[in-house]
Image (cartoon, rainbow, N blue to C red):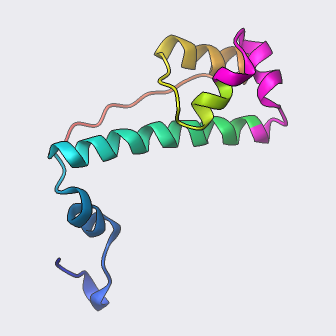
Amino acid sequence: MKKAENNITTFEELLDNKYGKRGTPKREEWEQQFEVFRLGALLEDARLKMGLTQEELAKRCGTNKSYISRIENNASDIRLSTLMKIIRKGFGGHLTLSLQLD
């Protein structure tokens, strides 16, 4: 494994070593799972900053507490329409997307 300056291994190098280079199936699976984790963490952080319980957020957007919990804990895929509803009705915000092509 190649080292960055000062013999420090970068996070990208660690990922390359453990999961392979970007574009390989194992690495792409890791990247996808990380994005699911990140989305759950972002939603949980927003909910906590607003002082809402999972149940209160669920009521605001017409779902149930267990679904909100599954999203926050990466155990459930979420449809874009549902994500938009949570952000719009639950948080009173809006969703901004970006697309990154490598």
Q: Provide residue 53's location: percent of width, then percent of height.
A: 82, 31
The reply to whether the magenta stretch includes residue 56 is yes
Please tell me whether the stretch drawn in magenta is mainly helix, strand or loop.
helix
Q: Residue at x 69, y 23 (%)?
A: 66
| Residue 89 or residue 26, whichever sits in front | 26
Residue 60 visible in the shown view: yes
Q: Provide residue 22's location: percent of width, then percent of height.
A: 19, 50
In this picture, is 71 found above or below 38? Answer: above
The reply to whether the magenta stretch includes residue 37 is no
Left or right of residue 75: residue 54: right
| Residue 15 or residue 10, whichever sits in front | 15
In this picture, is 41 found above or below 57? Answer: below
Query: Where, quadrant-wise, is the N terminus in this rendering?
Result: bottom left
Q: Quadrant of residue 67?
A: top right
Residue 93 visible in the shown view: no
Q: Residue at x 85, y 37 (%)?
A: 51
| Residue 45 or residue 20, whichever sits in front | 20
Write the start and end of the magenta stretch as one range: 48-67
Q: Provide residue 24's location: percent of width, then percent of height.
A: 14, 46
Query: Where, quadrant-wise, is the C terminus in this rendering?
Result: top left
Q: Provide residue 34's location: percent of width, then percent of height.
A: 41, 45
In this picture, is 14 found above or below 6? Answer: above
Q: Residue at x 46, y 36 (%)?
A: 36
Q: Residue furthest bottom?
A: 6
Left or right of residue 71: residue 47: right
Left or right of residue 67: residue 23: left
Number of numbered discs overlaid on the protein picture:
0
Q: Residue at x 34, y 67 (%)?
A: 11
Q: Quadrant of residue 97?
A: top left
